[in-house]
Structure formats: C-alpha cells, structure tokens
Image: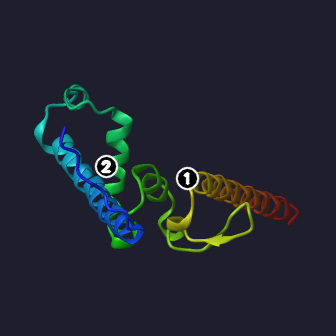
Amino acid sequence: MNELQLSNDLTTIETEIKSYQNIAGQSIFEIGRRLKHVKENDLAHGEFGKWLSKINMSRSTARRFIKVADSPELNSPSMANLGTSILYEIATLPEEEREKEHLTSSGEKKTPDEMTQRELQDLKKQLKQRDAFIGCGLFYLQHVKTLYFRKF
C-alpha cells in the first residue's frame, strides 16, 4: 500500500485540517441541496425513502442535511468547520437566536457557532422554557383581564 506521508510540521497539519473541514462543510450544503432537489422534483410520492436506502442514507440524516441547506446563513466560511450535527442544531434554532450571544451553563457568553452540541441542546431547552413561561404569563394576563372586566 502506498500511503501518503504526512508532515511533521504542526502548522502544516493544522492548515490541512482546516482545508478539509472547509471541504466537508461545503459538502454538507451541497448534499442537502441535492437531496432536497430529488425529494421535490425527481421521485414519485413515497419513493424518496426507497431512494435514500439505495444511497445508504437514513431519513433522519437526509432531513438534517436538507434543514441545513435551507438555512443559507449557515453556508459561510465561519460555519464551514462545523459538523452536520452542530449545523443542524443551529439550523433548528429560531432565526433571531442564531447570531446572538447566549449564556452557557458554565457561565460563558457564546454565539451558537462557538457552542458544543451539548451547549446548543441546552440553549434550545432554555429557549423552549422561556417561550413556555412567556406563554403562561400571557395566558395569566388574559385571564386577569377577563376577570377584571366581568366586574363591570
């Protein structure tokens, strides 16, 4: 076997890794674009799952690739080194939360592209709880308003 000799220079290896990360990041978007195209244009209803089996891809993986491809703001050089899982977590955040700094459980302020997958999952839980709390507050205010106006 003729194996490619790797450099012993750490800077060279870092540069090569970043280059491959960029290629991989771009590939995620291109795969997602193609999956979406096939799903929407090329197959009869119900055939997409069979076709995915043919290319050895699960429905959930395809759904993740498509979701990332549907988020053009994630197709940037700063996001290219993130993997499919992280990109999917960011793509499923509300748009207005994708570029904001958030406080992590460790007390650090980070934007979603700086977070680990665990931190992103925690952020999504926090946002869901916040929205539920706001929803409860609005319900309560509506209820109080209704009771108040019944008196008159």
Residue identified by numbered label 2: 66
Q: Residues within 10 Å of mark 1 (few under 14, many from 20)?
A: some
In the image, residue 55 above or below residue 63: above
Label 2 to label 1: alpha-carbon separation: 19 Å
Give percent across and percent down for residue 132: 69, 54
Q: Is residue 14 above or below residue 84?
A: below
Q: Secondary structure at mark 2?
A: helix
Residues tagged 2 and 1 counted as in contact (Cβ below 8 A): no
Q: Amino acid at mark 2?
A: Ile
Residue at numbered disc 1? 117
Badge nearest the viewer, 2 or 1: 1
Instruction: Decide which of 140, 129 is in the foreground and name it.
Output: 129
Report whether 11 appears left or right of 55: right
Number of on-image labels: 2
N-terminal-most mark, 2 or 1 = 2
Name the residue at the left extreme.
Answer: 42
| Residue 135 x/y as whole percent | 69, 57
Above or below residue 87? Residue 59 is above
Residue name at image x 36 percent, y 55 percent: 68
